[in-house]
């Protein structure tokens, strides 16, 4: 019987240049556990089977009736994976109000033109028609590589995960509005009984436009992990070594020297279900990592 599931699956080093530094530790931590990784170049590559395939060792994703803990039914999760989480987009948009005083700001430059925001008396008196200052975005948009830590133990509530997903989507949306281009990954790592695993999905490439509802679901809605993620892992027979509880979370490790920054999940921040507290905790974590584009309270930014 083949161990390959009935959807696209590969274990290449596709994201080796972007994943945080802990990637190597997945296979080289000295505990002699086997390791397995599934990487998806785009959300469209994820095609969960409608029912447990032959060889599935964990059927929670399809059969559990605990929709409150999982965040949605399996059918609803598949729909949100394709079409986005509309309520989450609304929540993310609401958080933007808080971000107005604390948002990332692209560097500005002064350009001179015949129309603009502020006049230059000297230029005007000298007869120079380009006597108006115009503020513009500086240089070419910068590319940021961000990864959302998709890990969450059983004690993390669906409400906590939803709050962090919405606040993370708001952060990405605002970075993009400030002329940063974000390359974004959802990564779930787990340490099981006899296996360490990693599932990584490229949620957004740097040149792709922001779809707030898609981001809100993919960046940590509980059903992204507990329906979609569990269906991917539970379908692969040789990943049985993760164990029936789907292992324990392995937090991602940021690598600022390589430009790989991590947006923490509710598992790490412990900020609960308040989206503002979740936003504050995620912004604070990114600032500690030196993530560009995030002004601190004094207005200073990382380079």
Image (cartoon, rainbow, N blue to C red):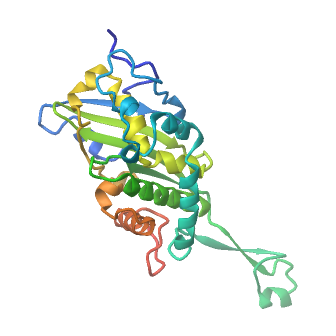
Is residue 137 shown above or below 112?
above
Total count of labels: 0
Quadrant of res 38: top left
Is residue 119 shown above or below 210?
below
Residue drawn at 28 percent across, 23 percent down = 57
Closer to us: 133 or 231: 231
x, y percentage for residue 263? 39, 56
x, y percentage for residue 66? 36, 41
Closer to us: 193 or 78: 78
Q: Is residue 177 left or right of residue 104?
A: right
Q: Is residue 113 left or right of residue 13?
A: right
Closer to us: 208 or 1: 1
Name, please, the residue furthest toward the front. Answer: 65
Residue drawn at 16 percent across, 33 percent down = 193
Is residue 34 shown above or below 15?
above
Is residue 112 shown above or below 142?
below
Which part of the image, by quadrant, shows the N terminus? top left
Name, please, the residue furthest toward the left. Answer: 31
Q: Is residue 42 visible?
A: no
Closer to us: 155 or 164: 155
Residue drawn at 23 percent across, 32 percent down = 244
x, y percentage for residue 151? 32, 46
Q: Is residue 216 left or right of residue 19?
A: right
x, y percentage for residue 29? 16, 39
């Amino acid at each position: 019987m083949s161990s390959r599931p009935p959807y696209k699956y590969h274990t290449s080093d596709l994201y080796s240049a972007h994943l945080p530094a802990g990637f190597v530790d997945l296979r080289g931590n000295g505990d002699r556990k086997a390791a397995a990784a599934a990487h998806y170049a785009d959300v469209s590559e994820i095609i969960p089977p409608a029912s447990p395939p032959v060889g599935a060792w964990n059927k929670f994703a399809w059969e559990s009736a605990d929709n409150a803990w999982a965040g949605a039914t399996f059918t609803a999760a598949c729909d949100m994976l394709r079409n986005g989480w509309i309520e989450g987009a609304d929540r993310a948009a609401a958080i933007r109000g808080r971000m107005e005083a604390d948002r990332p700001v692209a560097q500005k430059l002064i350009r001179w033109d015949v129309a603009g925001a502020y006049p230059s008396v000297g230029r005007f008196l000298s007869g120079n028609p380009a006597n108006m200052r115009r503020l513009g975005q500086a240089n070419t948009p910068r590319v940021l590589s961000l990864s959302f830590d998709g890990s969450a133990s059983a004690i993390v509530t669906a409400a906590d995960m939803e709050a962090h997903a919405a606040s993370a989507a708001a952060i990405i949306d605002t970075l993009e509005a400030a002329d940063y281009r974000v390359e974004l990954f959802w990564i779930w790592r787990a340490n099981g009984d006899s296996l360490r695993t990693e599932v990584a999905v490229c949620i957004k490439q740097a040149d792709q436009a922001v779809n707030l509802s898609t981001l809100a679901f993919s960046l940590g809605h509980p059903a992204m992990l507990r329906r979609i993620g569990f269906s991917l892992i539970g379908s692969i027979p040789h990943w049985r070594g993760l164990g029936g509880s789907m292992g324990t979370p392995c937090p991602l490790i940021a690598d600022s020297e390589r430009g790989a920054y991590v947006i923490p999940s509710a598992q790490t921040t412990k900020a609960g279900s308040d989206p503002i507290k979740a936003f504050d905790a995620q912004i604070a974590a990114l600032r500690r990592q030196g993530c560009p584009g995030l002004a601190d309270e004094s207005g200073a930014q990382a380079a």
